[in-house]
Structures are given as C-alpha cells and as structure tokens.
Image (cartoon, rainbow, N blue to C red):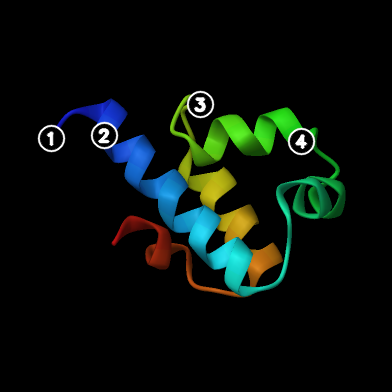
Amino acid sequence: MDKKLIYKNIGKNIAEIRRQRGYTQESFAELMDKSWSSVAKLETGCQNISIGKLIEIAEYLKVDFKEFLK
C-alpha cells in the first residue's frame, strides 16, 4: 500500500475521532500545544507521523492508537 494513502487514512481516522470528542482542529491543536496548521497537515495526510506521535494523540483523545490504523 502507498505510504501517502496510509497517512491519509490515519489522518482521516484522527479527524473523525477528534470530532467525536467535540474538538475543533483549533481547540485540539491548543490542547496539544501545537499549531492549527500542524493538525490540519496531519489530518490530511500531508505530514508523516511516527508511532510515538500516534500514541501521544491517542492519549489526548483517550483511545487506543490502533483505532487510527483501521
């Protein structure tokens, strides 16, 4: 599978869970002490993401990081 497609799917899953938790991109970026643009890039698959970062995001969203990999 193409890496770009993988990152895009992970980003889509992160965005969906973020919305379910009631966060906007802006409020979630503030919670994580990141810029809005970094969250936007992550969710659109324009930014590579490490397992460590997935785990960190999962902790903020209170889910198992494997939810992002579906």
Q: In the figure, residue 19 lies in which quadrant?
A: bottom right
Give the vertical position of 51 relative to 59 (above or below). Answer: above
- Disc 4 to disc 1, C-alpha distance: 28 Å
Q: Helix, strand or loop at disc 1?
A: loop
Q: Residue at x 18, y 28 (%)?
A: 2
Q: Residue at x 71, y 29 (%)?
A: 37
Image spot of residue 35 (x, y percent) = 80, 33
Sooner in the amino-acid sequence: mark 4 or mark 1: 1
Q: Which mark, residue 21?
A: none
- Asked if marks 2 and 4 touch (Cβ < 8 Å), the reply is no
- Disc 2 to disc 3, C-alpha distance: 12 Å
Q: Which mark, residue 36?
A: 4
Give amino acid for label 1: Met
Sooner in the amino-acid sequence: mark 2 or mark 3: 2
- Asked if marks 1 and 2 touch (Cβ < 8 Å), the reply is yes
- Disc 2 to disc 4, C-alpha distance: 22 Å
Q: Helix, strand or loop at disc 4?
A: helix
The residue under label 2 is 5
Sooner in the amino-acid sequence: mark 3 or mark 1: 1
